[in-house]
Amino acid sequence: MTHPPAKNLKDAGRFSTHFFRTDRETFSGWVVDQSEPSGLSTVEILVDGLPIKADLADRYSSELAQLGVDDPCHGFVFALRSSIVENARVIEARLANIGTPVGEPLVLDELTNASPSASLQGEVNWVGGLRLTGWVSTNEAEAPRVRVSVDGEAIAAARANRWRHIDQPRPLAVRAFDLHLPLRLADGQVWKVSVTLDDGRELPGSPITLVAFDRGLEAVLQNLSQTPGQRLQGRLFDQLIPQSLPFSLYGEWRNQFPDEPPQSIEKAIAVVLLDGDNLQLSLDSLEAQSHSNWTAGVLPSPDRYSFDPSELSIFFTEDSGEAAYFIFSLAGVTFEEHALARIVECFEEHPEAALVYGDLDMRGADGELWPIALPAFDYERMLEQGYFGGAFALTRAALQLAVAAATPNIFRVANICCDKSGSASAIWHLPGAIAQVGKDFLAGSQKALSAATSEHLAAMGVEAVVMSGFGSHWPACRTNRRIGRRPTVSILIPTRNRADLLSTCLGSIYGGAARAGAEIIVIDNDSTEPAALDFLAAAEREGVKILRAPGPFNFSRLNNLAAREAGGDFLCFLNNDVEARDNDWLDEMLSRHVDDKVGGVGVELLWPSGVVQHGGVALGMNFSASHAFNERIEDDPGYTDLLKVAHSCSAVTAACMTTSRERFLALGGFDELMFPVNFNDVDYCLKLRSLGLQVVFTPHARLIHRESVSRGRDDKADSAPRFARELRALRSKWGRVLAADPYYNPILALDCPPFSALAWPPRRRAPRTNTSFPPLEIPRGM
């Protein structure tokens, strides 16, 4: 609806305020305390004189920005139920406790015929470097176009074809955009850009002031021959505000940052190609190799993935000569010029290596290349995706295992190195593409992968059912390990008031908890609302254990108290704002623990809007930790199909996480002092990783998470200092790990969101294995 113009701040008294109707059920405004501009006010909204809601005025206000306020984050938004609005006559806003009016009361009858507001709902943010992200709420079916201009000159445009979850005025999935500005703006100068829609409306947050440096500030300072101390400052700047380029510029990026030429080591290598379409392309790429000491053999294949084991045996024993290393590849894979040389160099420099694989480039329909940036060895992903099974290399001794076992397909050759415990450290990854592949190079391989995974698990003595699935570019299967003696499990749920949330949570998990024979422990942290106390009493009568834990909110302390009281072999940490969608979620999580090398398991979490909230945790984003894939909508496959298959990651969220109670207590539980609210789950998962254990994310359990709805956001004024302190602690304790997440490729960007852009510049691309590091021990008080 239309609203009166805002007053000029210079003409206001102590409080400058504004209140207006945004749409039929939404009311907005802002409050600035002139005597304390950095302070935030609590606003309550009244309907016909009765208080209905209250909230902190801490949201971005485009009007305040236009008025030149230094900090425009003093806005508020209230969404009321339609039944309330329809029956209301006057809606007004006041400052809580003191009753000062906010703006003018709104008489709804007078606004009924007002024209729709031209106010634009959305925002734009500078992520760092040349990258802008944001969202826009629109009723249009087509994704709106966002335009960027400098001094009236259009310099960039993009469709808002991604997704963002917003909570206000109601939980909603809105269109989001992610765009990079032209490279010419990376000149170290300060630029101011405007961001608008096609119709000229400017997005809240615009104009944006930004600065970017060609290949990062450290490189600029190094070129200027600055001192080591200044270059170190540049490196820290690049860690905190990393730069990126879009995947669409990958060809140009490759030319800017070629792989370092490998050493010339004339060690014989043999190439085994499975017959199929485009075989000649593979042979031609071998002829162009810088490493010339190679021989090749082609094995007949009925389906591109399977072969007669006797044919492999003949090639291995009679035709491979003195080859120390063997490459296995599908037909149509075209090797980069130095691929064989890089593989030989890796084996020679790391004699403990039994298998080596590298990144791939995927050719689009138009011939453009797209990066397939793989992790250091990921056992769970190998089982469910066979992610390096299309092209890899083995030592003669490793291939001997496949020959002796009469291995019948390429995926089984790839995973046979893992038949022995402790073999993961012998698998090495080469960051940077070793070959190009077509987008359908693994089409139709589901059956071969499922068979290979089943054979491997059988060889390991693991009973499992392996079911074939479908990815967008990779095969996919789901591995259900059979749970022998069913372990006991305790579900731990901290809560304070909010009976509505807890009721929904408990009602949704009873089926899964009963199937797993789980005990449920609710940790009550000073609930005072009568409805909450009544609900807790009723839940206790029905068998839920209620643990009283008074005192300030400390997520780590609450869960540690419950863990000591729990009787289960396993703990399942669960937020009270999580809702299960089926009864299989807990069994799926516990089945991953059949592998005793798995220390923690997390699940896919969705916001109520259907946008992904948690798809695992990636390390290093802005020298911190970040949820992966929270710009994707439900059923999106994710980058390289990571939302289709279970895989390892460095951490998962404790909003829904399982772990061994014995291990949890042995590691001291969550750190109550350094991480009372944030990063306690990341810290714990990294402690598991430091013991050589895996942390597994599974998309085969999917729950709803109303993130932080019960305790509030961490960017509020009263929470921000604590969050900053916890972030400093994470960087101090785990800085070495944040700088080198083994599950995140060094060519991928470290600005958010993860898996969405190229690092500019890339980090060190040396051969790597899946290594974990111990924490830095920080003395108490430091």
Image (cartoon, helix red, strand yellow):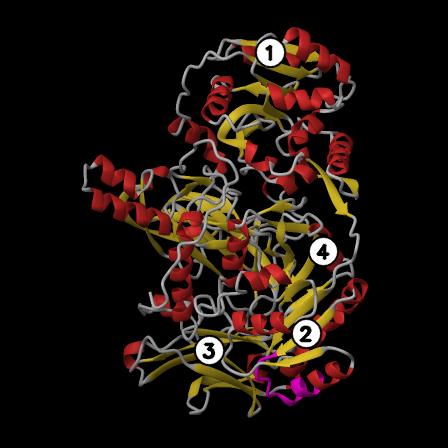
The amino acid type of the residue labelled 2 equals: Ile
Q: Pointer 4 and pointer 1: residues touching (CB < 8 Å)?
A: no
The quadrant of the picture occupied by the C terminus is: bottom left
Residue 170 left/right relative to 442: left
The amino acid type of the residue labelled 3 equals: Leu
Residue 48 left/right relative to 504: left
Residue located at (66% from left, 20% from top): 400
- The relative height of residue 625 versus residue 81 in the rendered view (above or below) is above
- The one of 300 and 394 positioned closer to us in this rendering: 394
- Residue 642 in sight from this viewpoint: yes
Residue 16 left/right relative to 682: left
Residue located at (32% from left, 70% from top): 69
The amino acid type of the residue labelled 1 equals: Leu
Q: Secondary structure at mark 3?
A: strand
Q: Spatial distance from mark 4 to mark 3, Cα to Cα?
A: 41 Å
Residue located at (53% from left, 37% from top): 376
Q: Which residues are magenta?
A: 524-535
- The one of 239 and 367 positioned closer to us in this rendering: 239
- The one of 624 and 346 positioned closer to us in this rendering: 346
Pointer 1: what residue?
283
Mark before the other along the chain sequence, 4 or 2:
2
Residue 647 left/right relative to 96: right
Pointer 2: what residue?
521
Residue 363 is marked as none
Q: Spatial distance from mark 1 to mark 3, Cα to Cα?
A: 66 Å
Mark before the other along the chain sequence, 1 or 3:
3
Q: Nearer the viewer, mark 1 or mark 3?
A: 1
Pointer 4: what residue?
590
Mark before the other along the chain sequence, 1 or 2:
1
